[in-house]
């Protein structure tokens, strides 16, 4: 339940404390019900304010550009078949006017890439550290399990065969922020005859949900250092890939947590009620203090 509260705090960018009395099972049941109702109500309210960006833009438009001249050493290794690490900082011109940014899709266009069948499969990985800026300019850091995605398209017609299709904000899943460390690869095993030496830039086309800043001009944003890893030019923005190392702001707990807790609670409540019912029929037994729920959180 603590993790569930942390997921709510991530979704709404707040520091609501978690508390409960573990001696009162009915209180736990009420806590789950009240928080679920509250989350749905707040999601509905936020849904009325949230704006969508890049939902139907043509290919190669409204993109964040990774240029070879800016990441020369990383691109040189990318030419030899290794991954290309990069970071989205939130200070990019595309993201600067937006807050509370979450992504619902990502496309990685690679002009100049060549393959035998004129199709390219781009593998992307969103590492487990995210930043989110609120409407007042406050910065929030969260950890979560890494997420891998595959973007597959035709290099001639730009027809898309597969895309990320990240969970929509109206679902029970916590959506991902694009701000944080990434890596990208074009595996030779899945791209026969691939050649990226002529690539001068990679264009990331993100579909986003966001809220505008509270003021006409958003507060300035600075680049934030993640855990150092390796010696590349973007090493200071990379993180160790450990799904198990989930910090206090974990947002990887989704509807499965609710389902498991609900099953355990129902089973526990049925057991308690069965025992109380049995005890009520014992000679000399009386119960004057019923179990009550304190729903204050």
Image: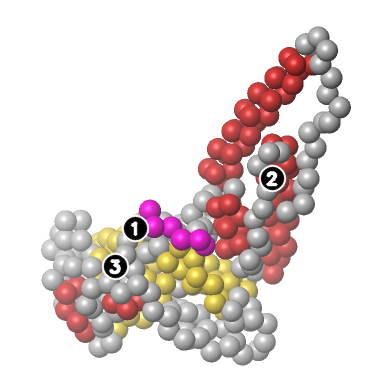
In the image, which is nearer the foreground, mark 3 or mark 2?
A: 2
Examine the residues drawn in magenta and state their main secondary structure.
loop
Task: Answer whether labels 2 and 1 touch (C-beta < 8 Å).
Answer: no
Q: Nearer the viewer, residue 159 or 86?
A: 86
Q: Distance between the residues labelled 3 and 1?
A: 18 Å
Residue drawn at x 61%, y 58% is: 8
Counting other residues with Cα less than 10 Å from the Cα at mark 1, is it few (<14), some (14-19), or many (20 or more)? Answer: few
| Residue annotated with mark 3 | 184
Locate residue 164, reporting x and y percent.
41, 58
Task: Answer whether labels 3 and 1 touch (C-beta < 8 Å).
Answer: no
Please state the total of marks drawn on the protein image: 3
Counting other residues with Cα less than 10 Å from the Cα at mark 2, is it few (<14), some (14-19), or many (20 or more)? Answer: few
Image quadrant where one finds the C terminus: bottom right
Q: For mark 2, give the secondary structure.
A: loop
Question: Which of the labelled discs sits on residue 242, or is there none?
Answer: 1
**Quadrant housing residue 49:** bottom right
Q: Distance between the residues labelled 2 and 1?
A: 33 Å
260 in the magenta segment: no
Q: Which of 142 and 83 is in front in this view?
A: 142
| Residue annotated with mark 2 | 21
Q: For mark 3, give the secondary structure.
A: strand
Q: Distance between the residues labelled 3 and 2?
A: 46 Å
Which of pointers 2 and 1 lies earlier in the amino acid sequence?
2
Residue drawn at x 47%, y 86% is: 222
Q: Give the range drawn in magenta.
A: 244-249
């Amino acid at each position: 339940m603590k993790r569930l509260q942390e997921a709510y705090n991530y979704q709404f960018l707040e520091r609501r404390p978690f508390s409960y009395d573990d001696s009162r099972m009915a209180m736990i049941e009420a806590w789950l019900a009240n928080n679920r109702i509250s989350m749905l109500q707040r999601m509905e309210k936020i849904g009325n304010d949230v704006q969508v960006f890049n939902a139907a833009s043509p290919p190669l438009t409204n993109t964040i550009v990774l240029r070879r001249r800016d990441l020369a050493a990383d691109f040189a290794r990318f030419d030899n078949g290794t991954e290309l690490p990069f970071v989205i900082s939130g200070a990019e011109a595309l993201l600067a006017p937006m807050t509370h940014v979450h992504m619902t899709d990502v496309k990685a266009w690679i002009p100049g890439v060549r393959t035998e069948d004129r199709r390219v499969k781009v593998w992307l990985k969103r590492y487990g550290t995210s930043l989110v800026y609120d409407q007042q300019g406050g910065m929030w850091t969260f950890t979560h399990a890494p997420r891998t995605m595959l973007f597959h398209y035709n290099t001639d017609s730009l027809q898309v065969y597969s895309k990320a299709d990240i969970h929509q904000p109206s679902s029970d899943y916590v959506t991902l922020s694009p701000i944080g460390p990434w890596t990208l690869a074009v595996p030779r095993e899945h791209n026969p005859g691939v050649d990226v030496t002529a690539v001068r830039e990679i264009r990331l086309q993100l579909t986003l949900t966001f809220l505008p800043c509270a003021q006409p001009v958003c507060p300035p944003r600075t680049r934030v250092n993640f855990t150092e890893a390796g010696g590349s030019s973007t090493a200071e923005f990379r993180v160790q890939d450990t799904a198990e190392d989930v910090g206090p702001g974990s947002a990887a707990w989704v509807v499965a947590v609710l389902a498991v807790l609900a099953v355990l609670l129902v089973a526990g409540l049925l057991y308690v009620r069965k025992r109380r019912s049995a005890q009520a029929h014992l000679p000399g037994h009386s119960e004057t203090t019923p179990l009550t729920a304190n729903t204050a959180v």
